[in-house]
Image (cartoon, rainbow, N blue to C red):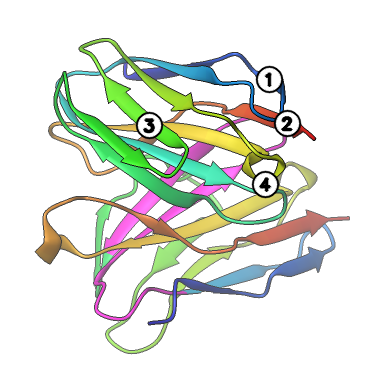
Amino acid sequence: NAGVMQNPRHLVRRRGQEARLRCSPMKGHSHVYWYRQLPEEGLKFMVYLQKENIIDESGMPKERFSAEFPKEGPSILRIQQVVRGDSAAYFCASSDVRDHTDTQYFGPGTRLTVL
Amino acid sequence: EDQVTQSPEALRLQEGESSSLNCSYTVSGLRGLFWYRQDPGKGPEFLFTLYSAGEEKEKERLKATLTKKESFLHITAPKPEDSATYLCAVQAQWGNQFYFGTGTSLTVIP
């Protein structure tokens, strides 16, 4: 059973460009979470999605950031007009609500560098 | 406000020297406390979930315990391959997100 997959693993963008980060959850998992990790800081929650639904986006910046989890295909975290402060590691996690443990399993992350 | 504090920030141990990592938390009703291991350049790897005070979980050289205010990750006779950053996270009773601490960076010297 493949784990959570994220791509690209590394992404370089210039200021003002758009960044698209993709996440495929573990097989059978219908819940996806996005976190951001800055150097020397802990993982910070951004958004929680189910298929075709945003459940909790309380951690998302109000501007330039959006997320979706379509019926078919991976979840996408989109950052428009990137700035240097967006440089970070972005992790996706997935969970299976059927097992009632709430355990989130993480992908390898996408490391975004904004030049 | 829900918060997680881990200590120490960094820990160096000789191979075979047992120790404990601490995770103190304040949360409005604990739904679960989670321990993860993170290697450089990788995503967090799930280790344990604890749900109620007094609960303990074990896996190889690791043992996690939980009280009403904190959790400990005990490492018995560590090996160099146990070197990693250990992360603690809590989930509140009525929330979905995890609140993470900043981690303890463990180095085990042969």
Dots 1 and 4: beta carbons under 8 Å? no
Q: Which of marks 1 and 4 is nearer the N terminus?
A: 1
Residue lying at the far right of the rendered structure: A115
Asked if badge 3 and badge 4 are on a common chain, one would say: yes
Which dot, 3 or 1, sits closer to the camera? 3
Dots 2 and 1: beta carbons under 8 Å? yes
Name the secondary structure under disc 4: helix
Position of A30 relative to B28 (above/below): below
Amino acid type at image mark 4: Glu
* Residue stretch in magenta: A24-49
Looking at the image, can residue A40 be seen?
no
Asked if badge 2 and badge 4 are on a common chain, one would say: yes
Rendered residue at 47%/60% (across/down)? A92
Q: Which of marks 3 and 4 is nearer the N terminus?
A: 3
Amino acid type at image mark 3: Lys
Q: In which quarter of the image is the N terminus of chain A?
A: bottom left
The residue to which callout 1 is attached is B11
CA distance separating discs 2 and 3: 18 Å
Asked if badge 3 and badge 1 are on a common chain, one would say: yes
CA distance separating discs 3 and 1: 17 Å
The residue to which callout 3 is attached is B63
How packed is label 3: few (under 14 Cα within 10 Å), some, or many (20 or more)? some
CA distance separating discs 2 and 1: 6 Å
Position of B39 relative to A94 (above/below): above
The residue to which callout 4 is attached is B81
